[in-house]
Amino acid sequence: MSQTKPSITTSFSYETLEETLDIPPKAERMLIGIPRETAFQENRIALTPDAVGVLVSNGHEVMIEHDAGAGSHFKDKDYSEAGARIVHDKVTVYQCPILVKSAPVTEDDLSLLQFNQLIISPIHLSVMKSSILAKMMEKRITAISFENLQDDSGSYPIVRSMSEIAGSAVMLIAGQYLSSANHGKGVLLGGISGIAPTKVIILGAGIVGEYATRAALAMGASVKIFDNNIYRLKRMQNNIGQRLWTSVMEPRLLAKQLKTCEVAVGALSSASGRTPMVVSDEMVSNMRPGAVIIDVSVDRGGCFETSEITSHEKPVFTKYGVIHYCVPNIPSGFSRTASQAISNVLMPLLLQAGEEGGFEKLVWRRAHLRNGLYLFNGALTNYHLSQRFQLKYTDLNLLMTSSR
């Protein structure tokens, strides 16, 4: 069988195709507005003067409402020297295409919001209402929440920082209310040579629980940690680097330990909805008079049945002789540190958005940021919110693909 050789004819012309390269996006100059927060107990500001200075020197414009940083002891002068524009009119700030808030969007804000605006703020499920979400959807707003904002390692940097502050602060607060000056037992938190250490019970082995444990151990207290998640208990042992007393939430054992403790910390968390209530009214009534309860999870319902929300102005109440500290948003009491922590996350994010040509392009290129978006051009992209408020859910990845 004869084989025919391949032949090349001059009627064809062979040309190499050009390689198509990923063209770097054109940088975008952004106008960022920061309003002064009027929400209950909100003292934080989302960008510090140093962060504003970096944004301005990179060609962006920042507009700040008069006295927005006062709660964190940042003056208008600090911001104007960093290159920000100070305005006395809230309406003008709300006209900025990008709005950065340290408190959730409230009903008072709705009339001021612009169409197609980008809002970066906390979400606070306990105060969120379907009417607020519906109005934001109507105005085709894109919204990013602090709580769900992920970094490229998969962790939640703002939540982690706030939890570290709350956990560290808990023991400072407990020490304060154990002293005689605050009608406490007159006990030094921790103890000294020759005197038995103070007993601290911590419910929850998350980040708040871990940092509360670190602080209590550093002061010399005896610490016992309860959590139903064995992995979290193991992780805490590894992170702290020493053998700890840990247990699952066994009611009889928990009641027995609470009877003899000086400090009990509620640091349980819940992925969606209410925190589990694990300490009953009866358990609290059997605690020692003068003991201190600090319920960090009170903003999500609390894990002590006796908990009632208090304020920074009147932080404690007494029930069954037990001092209860139930202030939501503990980091706001340490507002300057909290503001710096939030700013450290948001400033690089805003810079990246400018370099990529806007947030939409940034989110397209960096998929980990999509978890933080709960509204995208008016479409609700957070499944938990859609289930809770019976609103239409849209998959963000499908939305982004179809919009390109």
Image: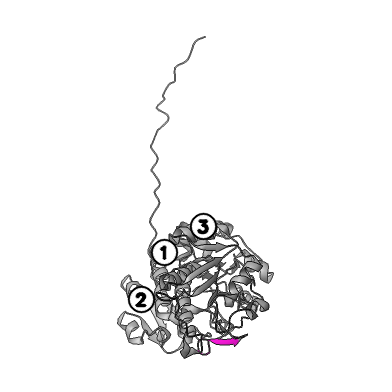
Please say whether residue 280 is visible from this viewpoint: yes
**Regarding mark 2 in the picture, which secondary structure is present there?**
helix
The disc label shown at residue 357, or none = 1
Magenta segment boundaries in residue numbering: 312-318
Q: Amino acid at mark 2?
A: Val
**Above or below: residue 206 compared with residue 63:** above
Q: Is residue 30 left or right of residue 227?
A: left
Whole-percent x, y for residue 374 in the image: 56, 67
Residue at the image point whose x is 49% and y is 10% from the top: 2
Q: Nearer the viewer, residue 250 or 162?
A: 250
Q: How many other residues sit within 10 Å of disc 3, few (<14), some (14-19) or many (≥20)?
A: some
Q: Residue 231's image quarter?
A: bottom right
Q: Amino acid at mark 1?
A: Gly
Sequence-earlier tag: 3 or 1: 3
Residue at the image point whose x is 35% and y is 79% from the top: 49
Q: Which residue is mark 2?
A: 52
**Regarding mark 1 in the picture, which secondary structure is present there?**
loop
The Cα–Cα distance between marks 1 and 2, rounded to whole angstroms, is 19 Å
